[in-house]
Image (spheres, grey):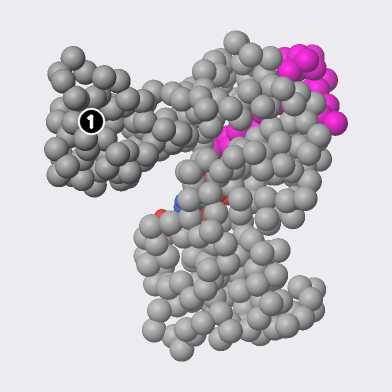
Amino acid sequence: MANSFINASLPDTSDRMLFAVPKKGRLYDQCLGLLSSIGIEFNRKPRHDIALVTNMPIALVFLPAADIATYVAKGNIDIGITGLDIIRESQTENDVAELLRLGFGKCKLQVQAPLGHPVVSAEDLVGKRIVTSFINLTKQRFAELEGVDPEKIRTQVRFVSGSVEAACGLGLADGIVDLVESGDTMRAAGLHAIDTILDTESVLITNQHPRFPKLAETIKKRVEGILTARQYVLCQYNIDRKSLEMACRITPGRQAPTVTPLEQNGWVAVSVMVEKKLVGDKMDALSDIGATDILVLNIANARA
Ligand SMILES: Nc1ncnc2c1ncn2[C@@H]1O[C@H](COP(=O)(O)OP(=O)(O)OP(=O)(O)O)[C@@H](O)[C@H]1O
Ligand SMILES: O=P(O)(O)OC[C@H]1O[C@H](OP(=O)(O)OP(=O)(O)O)[C@H](O)[C@@H]1O
């Protein structure tokens, strides 16, 4: 059960859903962008980690991404955004409900070793020294490799809180486990990836028993609408009715295309949602079967 913040210098959050957002780091900008696109308005005073939303009964709580899953799991926070890696590392997956994958903060948790060394697979690091911020996931992976329980592994797994990639160069580790997106940080440290433990991205989570289930559902639907709008475009074109069946096979839409008769005899106008990443191919194919006036429009928001 979430507690309100009881402190005279803090705003009264007792009647508000507490929504945790990373206070800095890789997910921060994307989260603020998402909050703005779902219509959440707030004023955050400098150095304040709680901000009252002005147009919904919500209080935003800015927390380290690494702590958000734990707060949500324990019920101190009702809903939040964090990384899948953090949920798994904090072993809270059974205590939080994953509402939506958000499509940003995508990266891999990988075992890495110095280039030019004989270590070419994670098995080669069994019994050696590993440094990481992801102690639990690392121990689980080496437990699998060693065929024992995580607390019985021979591999020495040591925690550092950041700049993990420096550990091998400084002589503290034979290998590391850390997040990799572009691979630039890894390569700059003279490392290469030898195993992937997890593919991660940011997720919207709630407590299993949220205090404000209707409001949490509203947030989920709004976010879903924005994700759909980001993923799809609206494609409009004209086509001879004789080719309509073929055109509908090319652009079946999410549900079905909208078809409107044109004044021009035997022709129809089609309006249909198309996945953004496929739109070039779809336009080529439509053009090949004689479609004309093919237009592609961005979708600002959507609701199923
Ligand atoms: N390079 C990256 N690309 C994409 N997502 C990332 C990347 N690095 C981290 N993330 C995601 O963002 C989350 C927060 O990581 P980030 O490095 O921003 O932490 P932080 O809050 O700044 O803390 P720290 O001070 O420990 O770095 C990670 O758990 C992961 O889900
Ligand atoms: O593959 P890349 O695109 O180079 O990204 C990977 C880096 O990003 C993260 O750190 P971040 O830069 O967020 O800072 P941190 O080391 O302080 O956590 C992660 O810990 C890696 O170091």
The number of discs equals 1
Q: Which residues are magenta?
A: 1-26
Instruction: Name the one closer to the observer, 217 or 3.
Output: 217
Counting from the top left corner in percent of width and height, residue 254 is at: 44, 36
Callout 1 crowding tier (Cα within 10 Å): few <14, some 14–19, many ≥20: some
Give the side of residue 222 with respect to residue 87, left or right. Answer: left
Q: Which residue is mark 1?
A: 241
Residue furthest out toward the bottom: 118
17 in the magenta segment: yes
Residue 298 visible here? no
Counting from the top left corner in percent of width and height, residue 278 is at: 30, 45
User: Which residue lies at the image location 56% right of the left edge and 43% below the top edge?
Assistant: 101
Question: Which residue type does callout 1 highlight?
Answer: Arg
288 in the magenta segment: no
Q: Quadrant of residue 1?
A: top right
User: Which residue lies at the image location 77% right of the left edge and 50% below the top edge?
Assistant: 94
Instruction: Name the one closer to the observer, 299 or 166.
Output: 299
Give the side of residue 195 with respect to residue 269, left or right. Answer: right
